[in-house]
Structure formats: structure tokens, C-alpha cells
Image (tube, grey):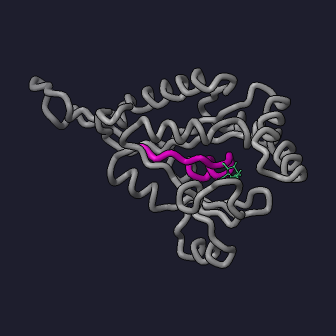
Amino acid sequence: MKPSSPPLASGLLLVLSAPSGAGKTTLARRLVQDAGDAIFSVSYTTRPPRGNEKDSVDYHFVDVGTFHEKIKRGEFVEWAEVHGHFYGSPRSIVEEALARRVMAIFDIDVQGGNAIKAAYPQAVLIFVLPPSLKELERRLRERNTEPEASIQARLLGARSEIEKGIDSYEYFIINENLSQAYGELQAIVLAERARKMRFDFSRLQLDWMPTKSRKAKT
Ligand code: 5GP
């Protein structure tokens, strides 16, 4: 998954979900950086920026009116209300990934991941787990960007997010040690890139086979 990664026969929609504090954003950003051909889906949100978050980098920060306009215009492939704020993934990212046959990475919650899977069954759902709820709480406090009430809400939400993820996701990574977790994520991505529906058989020069029979079935 370096800049020289072979091209794909069809786009790869990769969804990474986790309770906040499990480290999925770090993993997702690193994957985009290393993959060379990947697009990171920057979501729209009505929540105010936290810490040193930047507009159009971490999120597109918009007001509620603008968000609802975008819903009406069908600009989101999925959207949800999380902790009292709206979040939505731009449909344009999916379209770009499929048209350019590259990987798109969505750093979103479980309901969003399931909505993308319902619309695009070939999407890959990966869930990042913290080693324990205690460790999750420690990481949230260490981040020191939120009031106590918000930390408590996130901890409460974490339990149900983990249960929903275990119910519906396909791959799981425990993020105890970042470099090991990242290695596991890369292994999943490499395997998914090598699937028949995504493998670009036109790279091969199998001159004893007619081109038609080498085409990947989707
Ligand atoms: P945070 O406010 O901590 O950045 O995000 C809160 C939750 O919303 C996280 O679980 C995050 O993954 C999720 N989230 C971020 N963007 C989206 C999105 O576009 N759609 C959905 N469904 N969830 C999102």
C-alpha cells in the first residue's frame, strides 16, 4: 500500500468504527497517508470544532440549516445524529472512489457503517476495540478536550457502540498497541485488495487465456 500499490479493478469502501478514544482516527489517517491512492472521507458536522481541529481537514463544520439543506439535496451517502450533533458522509467521496477505483476511508460510527453497507454491500466494515473500558476512559481524559459531562456521555455510548459493532461488523482490531493494531489493519486492507472483485487482472499477461474469461466478477 505504498504509492506504487497496484491499481484496483473496483473501488474499495473501507469503514472504520470504534467508540471515541479507541484510536481509530489515528489509524485511519495513517492508512490514508501510507496508501498513496486513498481518499479520506471528511464528514460534515454541526458540532463545534474541538481543540486544534481544522475546518475541511478534520470535519467540514457547518450550521444546522446548511446540514439540512445538504440532506434535502441528497448530498450525504448516510447521516446520523450522534451525541446531539449531526454528522454526514459526503456522497461525492463514494462516487469518486468508485469512479477512480481507489480506496475511500470512512471514520464514522456503527449506524453510518451499516447504512453504507446497505447501500454498497461490497463495503468493508472494520471495528477498532479498546483493550478495556477502563483504558478507554483513561484515553478520553488524557485527550483533555471535553467537559466531564461529555466524557460521561461518550463512555455510556461506548458500551452500546461496541455491542452494535460486534453484532454487525466484519473485522475486529484491538488497539492496545498502535503499531500492532496498524499492522493488523494493513493486513485486512491487503487481503481486501486481493479479492477477486477488486483484483485487476488486466495487469497480468496471460496470453493463453482469452481476455473475457479473466474479467473479475463483481
Ligand atoms: P466526534 O465528535 O468525537 O468527532 O465523533 C463522534 C462520533 O461520530 C464518532 O463515533 C465518529 O466516528 C462519528 N462520526 C463522524 N463522522 C460521521 C459521519 O459522517 N457519519 C456518522 N454516521 N458518524 C460519524
Looking at the rendered image, the quarter that the C terminus falls into is top left
Q: Residue at x 14, y 27 (%)?
A: 205
Looking at the rendered image, the quarter that the N terminus falls into is top left
Q: Is residue 109 magenta?
A: yes
Height in image: 210 above or below 54?
Answer: above
The answer, for residue 162, to whether it is visible in the render is: yes
* Residue nearest the viewer, comparing 177 with 109: 177
Q: Count all numbered tags in the image, as a single digit.
A: 0
Height in image: 115 above or below 24?
Answer: below
Q: What residue span does the magenta drawing correspond to? A: 103-116
> Residue 153, how many percent across, how many down?
86, 50
Left or right of residue 184: residue 11: left
Left or right of residue 177: residue 95: left
* Residue nearest the viewer, comparing 27 with 88: 27
> Residue 136, how many percent across, how many down?
79, 34
> Residue 72, how many percent across, how many down?
58, 76
Q: Residue at x 41, y 44 (%)?
A: 38
The answer, for residue 213, to whether it is visible in the render is: no
Height in image: 207 above or below 141?
Answer: above
Q: Quadrant of residue 170?
A: top right
Residue positioned most to the left: 207
Left or right of residue 149: residue 40: left
Q: Quadrant of residue 92?
A: bottom left
Q: Is residue 212 magenta?
A: no
> Residue 111, how many percent across, how many down?
68, 50
Q: Quadrant of residue 88?
A: bottom right
Q: Residue at x 83, y 36 (%)?
A: 137
Q: Residue at x 67, y 38 (%)?
A: 168
